[in-house]
Image (spheres, rainbow, N blue to C red):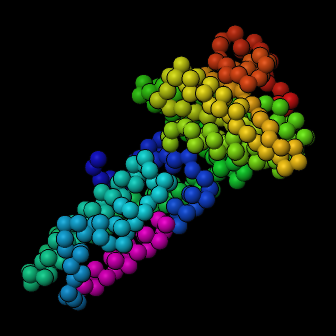
Amino acid sequence: MAGSTGISRTQEEAMIPNISNEEMRAALKELEQASYNHEQWAELLNSTLICRLPPDRRDIGDDAHRLCRFGQWYYNAAGVAFENNPGFVEIGIEHQHMHQAAAHLLRSAVDGAPILMEDYERFVSALKRLRLEIATAQHELKDALYNLDPLTGTPSRIGMLTRLREEQELVKRKVHPCVIVMMDLDHFKVVNDTYGHLVGDKVLASVAGYVMGHLRPYDKVFRFGGEEFLIYLPDTDLQTGYNVIDRLRAELGAMPHEAESEGVFHVTTSFGLTLLDPDIPVELSIDRADKALYAAKAGGRNRTALWEASMNAAPNKPGTSA
């Protein structure tokens, strides 16, 4: 992949994997520390060049990009928050380019040769691109973190429609299909009434965490409201989406939850699926998934239902999930 400024990356390309708030905060802190270490290195490099000081021999080798403190973090310690993130790949590319340019400058200084302006400008340009890639990654992490639902760790509805409209553009261009899923916990009011809201909150968080942990990094789960969640599965046809979601439904129903005074209990879920339609507003595709969810509820719950045109005549799902 060629180096780039990162500005033109689509949100679909720059998605943050499904990880917890704590992991994301830790990743952001690590990136900020690594960025600080890099800036310290850059200042020292300029001092070495200006004052004609003896360079660190590690900065002259072909593997200099792996030996600096930023490189050691990047290649050995960077965590799950950066996996499958093309922006993180771009950071590595620009970091290596910058070190190659820096090594050329340092070797010229060691040999007593004059430092050419074009060589120094090549280094400065690579340094600027690297800083921009790092800043972009920090922005993406902060944006994802601040838009997370504090209870479940899933993204909130803020930005949900924007992401779905971006997906719809890909569907329109026939890049890939996309499945929209509405998910609702069955009889959740009974859970709260029987075990209390603290236990209910733990159930919500556990279910959301399980779903996020058992989908692909670029699948997305949003807390839609209450005990409802919206999931979208890009690059997925309807049958594949049904198979994935129905497997999740069975696994969630078998998941044990515990209340101190009542022991172990189970909570089932219902799902409604539809394809993201390229020819209608995104909100109507969501409504179709919602009608399929209502059909699953009406059919006995703990079911996965596909939207059918006949469901348009059905009433909307009740506001509560009794």
- Give the image location of residue 167, x and y in percent: 51, 33
Is residue 136 inside the magenta stretch?
A: no
* Residue 59 against residue 136 in the figure, above or below: below
- Give the image location of residue 115, x and y in percent: 14, 78
Residue at 86 percent of width and 30 percent of height: 322
Residue lying farthest to the top in this orientation:
310
Q: What's the magenta bit mostly, secondary-structure-wise?
A: helix
Q: Nearer the viewer, residue 242 or 38?
A: 242
Q: Nearer the viewer, residue 54 or 169?
A: 54
In the image, the segment drawn in magenta is 30-50
Residue at 24 percent of width and 75 percent of height: 58
Is residue 38 inside the magenta stretch?
A: yes
Residue at 19 percent of width and 74 percent of height: 60
Rendered image quadrant of residue 299: top right
Residue at 47 percent of width and 65 percent of height: 31
Rendered image quadrant of residue 272: top right
Q: Nearer the viewer, residue 196 or 5?
A: 196
- Give the image location of residue 307, x and y in percent: 65, 17
* Residue 283 against residue 5 in the figure, above or below: above
Q: Nearer the viewer, residue 120 or 21?
A: 21
Specify whether residue 27 is in view.
yes
Please indicate whether residue 71 sits to the left or right of residue 105 in the image. Answer: right
- Give the image location of residue 287, x and y in percent: 69, 25
